[in-house]
Image: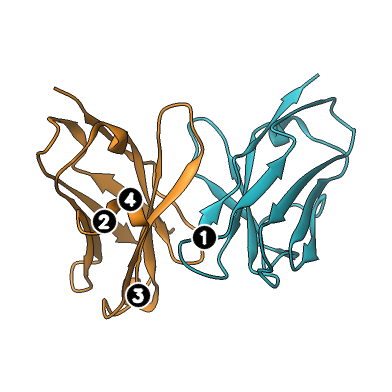
Chain colours: A orange, B cyan
Amino acid sequence: EVQLVESGGGLVQPGRSMKLSCAASGFTFNNYDMAWVCQAPKKGLEWVATISYDGSSTYYRDSVKGRFTISRDNAKSTLYLQMDSLRSEDTATYYCARGPGDAWGQGASVTVSS
Amino acid sequence: DVQMTQSPSYLAASPGESVSISCKASKSINTYLAWYQEKPGKTNKLLIYSGSTLQSGTPSRFSGSGSGTDFTLTIRSLEPEDFAVYYCQQHNEYPLTFGSGTKLEIK
């Protein structure tokens, strides 16, 4: 069974950093591009970033470029999202998703507040 | 960026009825359009990709159509489990963009 399990969320102050992880199982992780998608409270889905299957290419939405870094460890079947210089508008649930969007995690909640 | 305009934002229908949701792209995305279902307590589910191809496990009462800029998700003969929020997403180019969602509620 394909599973994606996010961890690392919580409450963080503006300007600080947080790192999310997504542990993948049930499929050959290094065959797939992976993505992070977020959803602010009571809002819709918003794509954040994508990384290619081998980590050689990354793509970001403009609002997180230079602040967020997507990475992966194929040996550990784990996806990461390093979030720096966090802002209140980054408050959201962050989902990891397998490239084609055919598998999603349950999400990790991130609240940026003083 | 490709803007995805989804309508309606809210839809009320009864089990057994058929409904359609529209998604319009601000420029051509060929058929690089996916539809997702969001339900409380469940992970998001890919229903349709490439505009009209049913993802494995998607019931046949769901169908997708369109190409270029205009797309439609149709659900025939609604079942109780279909009441949820639906999103379209274009994956023709980065940044990937979603529609604003359609909440389908029981009338």
Q: Mark 4 packing: few (<14 Cα in 10 Å), some, or many (20+)?
A: few
Which of label 1 and label 3 is nearer to you? Answer: 1
The type of residue carrying mark 1 is Asp
C-alpha distance separating marks 3 and 2: 16 Å
C-alpha distance separating marks 4 and 2: 25 Å
At mark 2, the secondary structure is strand
Chain ID of residue with mark 2: A
Q: Which residue carries the number 3 mark?
A: A52
Chain ID of residue with mark 1: B
Q: Which residue carries the number 4 mark?
A: A63
Chain ID of residue with mark 4: A
C-alpha distance separating marks 1 and 4: 13 Å
Tell me, yes or no, whether the two marked residues, 3 and 4, touch with CB atoms within 8 Å.
no
Q: Which residue carries the number 2 mark?
A: A23
The type of residue carrying mark 4 is Ser
**Foreground residue, B40 or A25?**
B40
C-alpha distance separating marks 1 and 3: 21 Å
To which quarter of the image does residue A88 belong? top left
- Residue B1 numbered tag: 1
To which quarter of the image does residue A60 belong? bottom left
Which of label 1 and label 2 is nearer to you? Answer: 1
Q: Is residue A88 above or below residue A67?
A: above
| Same-chain status of marks 4 and 2 | yes
Q: Mark 1 packing: few (<14 Cα in 10 Å), some, or many (20+)?
A: few
